[in-house]
Image (cartoon, rainbow, N blue to C red):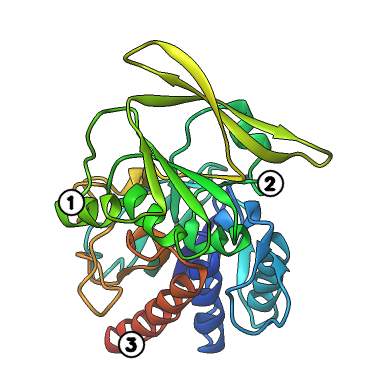
Amino acid sequence: MTETFLTDILILGAGPAGYTAAIYAARANLKPILVTGLQPGGQLTITNEIENFPGFANPVQGPWLMEQMAEQAKNVGTVIHYDLITQCNLSTPKKDDPYFTFHADSGNIYKARSAIIATGAQARWLGLEAETRLQGFGVSACATCDGFFYRGKKVAVIGGGNSAVEEALYLTHHADHVTLIHRRDSLKAEKIQQDRLFNNPKISILWNSVVEDILADGNPPVVTGLALRDVVKNESYQIAVDGVFVAIGHTPNTKIFNDQIELDNEGYIITTPGTTKTSVPGIYAAGDVQDKHYRQAITAAGTGCMAALEAERFLASST
């Protein structure tokens, strides 16, 4: 049986941004409803060890950290619904009906006076079976998150845009050597970034090459190398590496907001600088769905806090 739920604040997404927003909104006695989406916990549910989230002397597991955030949100009064929003109407509410409307996969309808969009972004992957199997065992999409584990080792970065070049440069602070692998014979990254890459003695580039497979050994398995193919010569070859960083971009989870809210040309929600305000008054965006630069759990949590505080002020001024 489907139901209609009314709330002052609806939070979409159950990562660090969504849970933090929920904690702050609940502590303000706004009785928020949080709809988790398909992946409660977000990208941290596929992150084995986290060493850079403040408050823990030792590494913690990503799924455990998300469970703790969820429990904290519940304990202060958040109602969590394990559902997926599939459609929304963000037209300016009328005086006789001051609610935005959200339709869920379950058939439930959520009507909210304000909403915080924290649906995150997904890393683009190569589509290899080994890539999925070895995530957390040598395959990553975040050098800032995992580069520390490759001190003194050899790693590869896949990609040719700004993200790939930035990841490669960052990894030189930890790894002994970084190999950038690109399927073309030139990079798409900004010229100044390319100059930094070419001038770094710890980086080498394999041009016109694509990844055919990721090699691993042991139990549990760990990455040992890459099987590559030169697309010009049509020749296969292998290289030895200890880690693989896929940097071919991210896709923000904003499809249902097309034509509803202002997005940039990559699909990220545009927010007013220094705030989480979107183009629709009463709608806020937090975390990776509006942040293409940092993409860290701690920055996502920070914007979740900002969004809740701004939504609280919006609600106070509209009553």
Q: Quadrant of the C terminus?
A: bottom left
Quarter of the view holding residue 215: top right
3D distance between C-alphas at marks 2 and 1: 31 Å
Q: Tag 1: residue type?
A: Glu
Determine whether 28 is above or below 183 in the image. Answer: below
- Please rate how many residues cluster around mark 3, counting C-alpha atoms within 10 Å: few if below 14, some from 14 to 19, many from 20: few
Q: Which residue is mark 3?
A: 313
Q: Residue at x 59, y 76 (%)?
A: 53
In the shown orientation, is residue 36 left or right of residue 268? right
Q: Quadrant of the N terminus?
A: top right
Q: Nearer the viewer, mark 1 or mark 3?
A: 1
Q: Tag 3: residue type?
A: Arg
3D distance between C-alphas at marks 1 and 3: 40 Å
- Please rate how many residues cluster around mark 2, counting C-alpha atoms within 10 Å: few if below 14, some from 14 to 19, many from 20: some
Q: Nearer the viewer, residue 250 or 214?
A: 214
Image disc number at residue 137: 2
Label 3 residue SS: helix
Residue 101 image point, x, y percent: 37, 56
